[in-house]
Amino acid sequence: MESSKLVKFLADITPKERERFRQFVISPYINQHEKTTELMKIILDAIDRGTEKSLDKCKVFKKLFPGVKYDEQQLHNIMSYLKKLYHKFLAYEMFEQSDFQEELFALEAAFESNQFDLLKNRGKQLEKTLERHPHRDYKLFYANYKLNSLLAYYAGHYEDRSKSENFQQMLDNLDRFYLAEKLRHCCHLTANMMMMNTHYNFRLLDDILEHIRENWDEFQEVNAVIVYYTILMSLREDNNPEHYQTLKVILDTKIDSLSHTEQADLYTFLTNHCIRQINLGANDYHRELFQLYKLGLRTGLLLDHGLLSEWNFKNITVLGCSLKEYEWTEQFINDYKDKLPAKHRDNAFNYNLAHLYFNKKMYNEALDALLLVQFTDVKYHLNTTFLLLRTYYELRDTEALLSLIETFRIYVIRSQKISTDQKRGYTNFLRFAKRLVMLKHQSYTYSKQNLKDKLSDLHQKIDQTKNVINKFWLLEECAAA
């Protein structure tokens, strides 16, 4: 029974959520089936004690029905009832967290039951709430659409049919809701197409974009439409810097008027635009991205439920070092260590501290930090080994370096977590790295011109080889004769 989906679902939620579920099930309005309540208590008590793995169907049945012969179908039925209650609980929790849904359902119920005084009274209150709401996003447009739909059809049926204001409001907000949501999804799916080689049919999109351009002034207060229109154009016209600059102005001047979803999307697409430009060789975007990272940390836009991902932690450290912002980067590493997910905290901290030390040419300190990194993840193994290799190289520790190259070569060949293409890239890198080490660390055996010629020849071979991991470092070291 401990392997049942019901037990797993309940074990996965937080203690506070389990307590709310307990209250939900014991509510007589929600559930009046006594055995279902008893089963819920048995399961939750076992989870709270950490003994859910000991739950046995026969023992649970005996607790529910003392003295009765075991009937698996009967137990299955009760578990099915409880699972349905859990699904209903999830729906109710989401309903409670959704903006305006309770008010809208109350108004719809009042309309359907002909309680028109209630409809008009609560409708006016919701109108005021929507007017005061700080975010003009798709949720607000949808709520305005539903509200005006109810009020318009009530007035059309029971009052003055010539009144058209609510009908116009209904249509306008339906359009805004549709446009904001259409553009939002088109932005994400366009980005997906660019990254994953997928394809989607964006029906009506060109007509929508033309409509927005022709009626631009009408949309100036509809921030959601302006934001997602501009993001989409920045993706479709990647070489046009005007879209990026427009998004930066919105980020600087209208960030508080956007919902959390819109803020996160705007920030993410801005940073991704910088990364794309950097990958295309636009070096001036390094500083742009660095400032965006600082803003994301300051505003919390880079955090997810208060946590900073280990990969964003790494990206910020690498960028800070490349810009030689060593003091700020060291402060960042120490300040945000506790914001890392607990599972990867020590590895991420030690690896990035080593990266900082390496860039500051504090090679012995870098080695000390790298030796604390545990290879719990193939990415950490690969990244740490490459940084360790570079550190030994700078220290001119040829013996340790050659030993590491051979050990790493065997690891790459044997690893089942590295693709064939990646293996070829790493083995090519290690082959060239070994030749580079032998040339550089035994340079005293060559004349200056002979060494230069050999490094030039190696540079050419590396450059002509298609699949080489960390090619940039090899080429850089070959050129530094």
Image (spheres, rainbow, N blue to C red):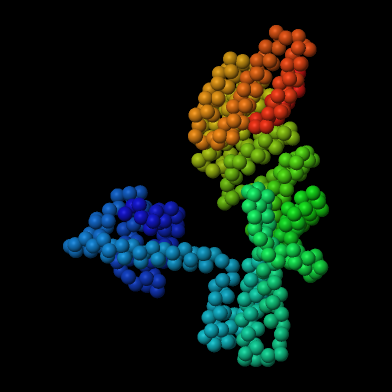
Q: x, y (%) of residue 256? A: 70, 59
| Quarter location, residue 282 | top right
Q: x, y (%) of residue 335? A: 62, 39
Report how many numbered discs are placed on residues in the image: 0
Q: x, y (%) of residue 202? A: 68, 62
| Quarter location, residue 436 | top right
Looking at the rendered image, the quarter that the N terminus falls into is: bottom left
**Front one among 106 and 112:** 112
16 left or right of 239?
Answer: left
Residue drawn at (58%, 41%) of the image: 310
**Front one among 106 and 282:** 282
Residue drawn at (61%, 31%) of the image: 425
427 left or right of 76?
Answer: right
Looking at the rendered image, the quarter that the C terminus falls into is: top right
**Front one among 249 and 416:** 416
Residue drawn at (82%, 53%) of the image: 242
**Quick check: 368 above or below 202?**
above
Q: x, y (%) of residue 474? A: 69, 25
| Quarter location, residue 257 | bottom right
Residue 413 visible to the viewer: yes
265 left or right of 417?
Answer: right
**Quick check: 93 above or below 348?**
below
Residue 372 visible to the viewer: no
Residue drawn at (68%, 55%) of the image: 190
**Quick check: 372 above or below 121?**
above
